[in-house]
Image (cartoon, grey):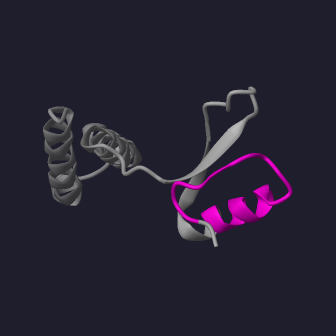
Amino acid sequence: MYKIGDIFYEDEHYGERAQFCNENGLVIVEIAPDEEGNRRFQIQAIPSPSAKEQAEQEIAELKRALADTDYKAIKYAEGLLTAEEYEQTKRQRAVWRARINELEAVE
């Protein structure tokens, strides 16, 4: 029915095209207007994120994980957790920080 690369104008079939794209992991992108200035659209594949974008997303997730365990670090610092109780969290946080440092080097 529809395919990647199809160029079209906004018409009564726009909704059908949008549904097709939603069901197939595609997007509708507005492209340059035609010679008369009419708006045109094209069905396109969703671009894969770049290595830098993937790294940024993973960094954000790791920073959330660190933030989610901050309370344990504070409890340990205040003497409310023993070294034994905090050890596993401490090791995991070190792994997360090391991974963040690796990912920050990605360009």
Residue positioned 76% across, 33% down in the render: 38
Name the spot of residue 67 as percent of width and height, x first.
Answer: 38, 42
Whole-percent x, y for residue 49 in the image:
36, 47
Q: Residue furthest front?
A: 35
For residue 106, side relative to residue 79 (left or right): left
Residue 47 visible? The answer is yes
Q: Which residue lies at the image location 65% right of the left edge and 44% below the top edge? A: 41
27 in relation to 98, above or below: below
Q: Residue at x 68, y 40 (%)?
A: 40
Q: Quadrant of the C terminus?
A: top left
Q: Quadrant of residue 14?
A: bottom right
Q: Position of residue 94 (x, y in %)?
A: 15, 46
Q: Position of residue 77 (x, y in %)?
A: 26, 37
Image position of 99 with respect to 39: above or below: below
Q: In which image quadrant can residue 70 be found? A: top left
Q: What span is colored magenta in the figure?
A: 3-21
